[in-house]
Image (cartoon, helix red, strand yellow):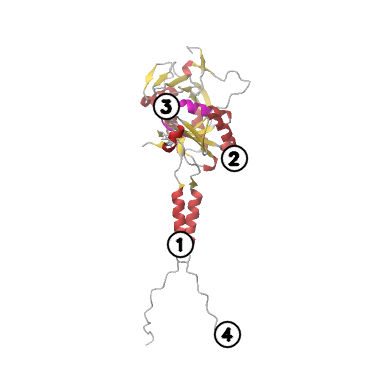
Amino acid sequence: MAKTKKKMPGLNTTSTADISFMLLIFFLVTTSMDTDMGLARRLPKPPEPDQEDATMDIKSRNILFVRINAAGQLWIKDEMNSGFGDIKELRQRAKDFIKNEQNLSKWPEKHVKNIDLLGQCFVTDKHVISVQTDRGTPYNMYFQVQNELVAAYNEIRNELAKQKFGREFQYLTKEEKDAVKKYYPQNISEAEPKKYGGEQ
Amino acid sequence: MAFKKKEKRGMPEMNTSSLPDLIFTILFFFMMVTTMREVTLKVKFTIPQGTELEKLEKKSVVSFIYVGPPTDNLRAQMGSSTRIQLNDRYAEAREVMDFIAAERKGMTNQAEQIISIKADQQTQMGYITDIKEVLRKSWALRINYSASRRN
């Protein structure tokens, strides 16, 4: 005599949620969501094998030297003045140097350049900021110098962006950004530049 | 009466059968957006603090180089002078070239490769300069000095 078919009892799945919660917590603990941040830089291309001297010829008025010695002290030198400097004044020095607003003969030479969107500009794009370190220089000091120099560029680019486009640099379109970058190109060199023509 | 008072019903139980699915979705989300800590650190470092930092967006193109003194438990064997760590072991600066090549193999867009240097604040620049020189030779030109934000 066949019994009446019993209903299959449902599997109790109440604890599945707890199990998956535990998995979730395990993953939360073992993985890291920390967003890595850092100062982005671009290294120069490697020297060509047949190229004997990789150094560039740069007029001395176009160079701002920043030397960091093993004790972490700064030596800032351009045609205008030279001497030990503090990290706090580096940003302003770099800004004044790059802009050369009064077109002084001891700061980078200016020449007319045609830039899209900005038209005829009087730019100092031949300037170079040369950072030199010693093998014993503390990394932190080098990093702070790089940070200040990038900050100097960011600030003057921001000023230009506000003046020309009425917005901060980060809100510009790609074309506008390129124009501003052409106006103030970032020339931070870590190679030893060879200079010639002390007075212009 | 047409409207007979119904007998009182108990509170219906909520159907929780989709709860595990929900949690699994969250789990998968976290598995996607986070990265496993793939290396065990053998060097100790405090990264410098800066203000002009950029985020490392694409994790898949980033390779890390760690520079610093050995961790406390390894100090007895390894001493306390600065070491370079690539993947799970100590290495010399010249080995960076092989490391870069190996890292590149797994990448689809090799031109976008970024090398993040996580170095201790007290590191002497000699080590960093050596690494940078090798990086230049291996055409890994986009680098990133890892740092935390200063307020």
Which of A88/B143 is in front? B143
Q: Quadrant of the N terminus of chain A?
A: bottom right
Quarter of the image for residue A150 reads top left
What element does badge 4 sit on?
A: loop
Viewer-nearest of discs 4 and 1: 4
The numbered mark at residue A17 is 1
Q: How many marks?
A: 4
Residue matched to label 3: A138
Where in the figure is residue A68, as x and y percent of width and height?
A: 42, 22
Q: Does the segment drawn in magenta span residue A73?
A: no
Q: Earlier in the sequence, mark 4 or mark 1?
A: 4
Q: CA distance from mark 3 to mark 2?
A: 34 Å
Determine whether the residue tagged by mark 3 lies in a helix, strand or loop: loop
Q: B136 or A76: nearer the eye? A: B136
Mark yes or no: residue A100 visible: no
Sequence order check: which comes first, mark 4 or mark 3? 4
* Foreground: disc 2 or disc 1: 1
- Say if B40 sits above or below A108 in the image: below
Chain of the residue that carries numbered disc 2 in the rendered image: B
**SS at badge 2:** loop
Q: CA distance from mark 4 to mark 1?
A: 39 Å
Segment colored magenta: B118-132
Q: Secondary structure at mark 1?
A: helix
- The disc labelled 2 sits on which kind of residue? Asn
Q: Cα distance, mark 4 to mark 3?
A: 89 Å
